[in-house]
Image: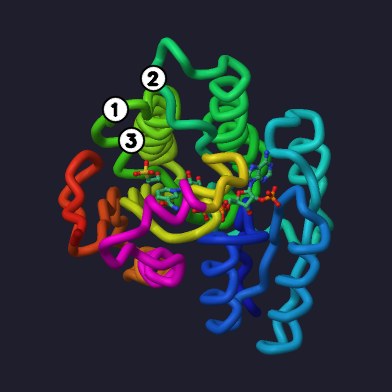
């Protein structure tokens, strides 16, 4: 029987790449996002290409009621979830603490922290039953705070802490918990952060070769496929030009 992976934020970037990687490995996919058309395209393409099954679910992960309605009431044949990838997330703005918009802070906290908690809590009974695996997408921003990163960094520090807490509390159930903390990866992330300003977004990735979404998918595949008795706790990964959250070497 095929295994099942649930990936939040699968309409683009890491989530889409992780969906492709696991579909290629024969896994069935539960995929979530807000953008119906994009998610449907990902699901249909992967079904056709790899002959796997998908269950696309459209909801805003900030909406507690919607998350629980969709994820706690999965059709029976989709309840045996082996892996949950908590990936849906975003940064909004790159402003000093004094200049940043409170609405941006609230959206980041509601999505990156509360959304991850809701999704985890909603499917935990299924994951426990499967002795499954939770993989949380953190960031190097969750390891060191950088200038004008304030609340985005705080949300990713929270992901780091929640990951550690989940691993401790879920030990008796043989549930693995892993965090993957990437540095700069070229996706729509910066376009979203800079609210559609492509020149600001492109500048983030100029002068060096950033990671690609596929690199994150490869690591996710790796941590998911180590032997049953092994749990990779924490992966911090950057491109060769980046040392940590604050130090990036750009060619002129
Ligand atoms: P993308 O913008 O390409 O993808 C973000 C995904 O999250 C989309 O599928 C989006 O779907 C989904 N999402 C965002 N907000 C919501 C919401 N409220 N409800 C449901 N889904 C939502 O960016 P990335 O792939 O780069 O980002 C994925 C994760 O990786 C994020 O958590 C990000 O913080 C993290 N990260 C990114 C890095 C980078 O440099 N790119 C580095 C380190 C971590 P939709 O809009 O359709 O709802
Ligand atoms: C995304 C990477 O460096 O923009 O988490 O915070 S960074």
Where disc 3 sits, the SS reads helix
The residue that label 2 is drawn on is 96
As for residue 202 lying within the magenta part, the answer is: yes
Task: Characterize the local packing of mark 2: few (<14), some (14-19) or many (20 or more) Cα atoms within 10 angstroms.
Answer: few
Q: CA distance from mark 1 to mark 3?
A: 13 Å
Disc 1 residue crowd, few under 14, some 14–19, many 20+, Cα 10 Å: few
Q: Nearer the viewer, residue 178 or 145?
A: 145
Q: Which mark is residue 142?
A: 3
Q: From this view, report whether residue 139 is shown above or below residue 81.
A: above
Residue 134 visible in the current orientation:
no
Judging from the image, the colouring scheme is rainbow
Does the residue at mark 1 contact the one at mark 3 (Cβ under 8 Å)? Answer: no
Seen at 24% across and 33% down, the residue is 144
| Extent of the magenta region | 199-219
- Image quarter where the C terminus lies is bottom left
Q: Which mark is residue 147?
A: 1
Label 3 beta carbon within 8 A of ligand 2 = yes
Query: What distance separates the C-alpha of mark 1 from that of mark 2?
Result: 7 Å
- Magenta stretch: dominant SS? helix
* Residue located 51% across and 50% down the image: 189
In the image, the residue with mark 2 has its CB under 8 Å from the nearest atom of ligand 2: no
Looking at the image, which residue is at 82% across and 57% down? 36
Q: Is residue 224 above or below residue 46?
A: above
Q: Does any portion of residue 182 appear in the rendered image?
A: yes
Seen from this angle, which residue lies furthest top? Answer: 98
């Amino acid at each position: 029987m095929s295994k099942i992976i649930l990936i939040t934020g699968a309409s683009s970037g890491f989530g889409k790449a992780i969906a492709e990687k696991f579909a290629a490995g024969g896994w069935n996919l539960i995929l979530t996002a807000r953008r119906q058309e994009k998610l449907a395209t990902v699901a249909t393409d992967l079904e056709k290409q790899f002959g796997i099954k998908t269950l696309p679910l459209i909801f805003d992960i900030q909406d507690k009621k919607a998350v629980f309605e969709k994820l706690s009431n999965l059709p029976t044949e989709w309840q045996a979830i082996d892996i949950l990838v908590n990936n849906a997330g975003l940064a909004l703005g790159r402003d000093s603490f004094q200049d940043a918009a409170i609405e941006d802070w609230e959206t980041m906290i509601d999505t990156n922290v509360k959304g991850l908690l809701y999704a985890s809590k909603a499917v935990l009974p299924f994951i426990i039953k499967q002795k499954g695996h939770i993989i949380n997408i953190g960031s190097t921003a969750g390891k060191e705070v950088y200038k004008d990163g304030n609340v985005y960094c705080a949300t990713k520090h929270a992901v780091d802490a929640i990951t550690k807490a989940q691993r401790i509390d879920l030990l008796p159930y043989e549930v693995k918990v892993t965090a993957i903390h990437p540095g700069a990866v070229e996706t729509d992330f910066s376009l979203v952060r800079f609210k559609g300003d492509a020149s600001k977004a492109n500048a983030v990735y100029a002068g060096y070769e950033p990671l690609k979404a596929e690199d994150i998918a490869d690591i996710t595949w790796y941590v998911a496929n180590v032997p049953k008795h092994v749990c990779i706790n924490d992966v911090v990964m950057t491109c060769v030009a980046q040392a940590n959250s604050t130090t990036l070497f750009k060619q002129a």
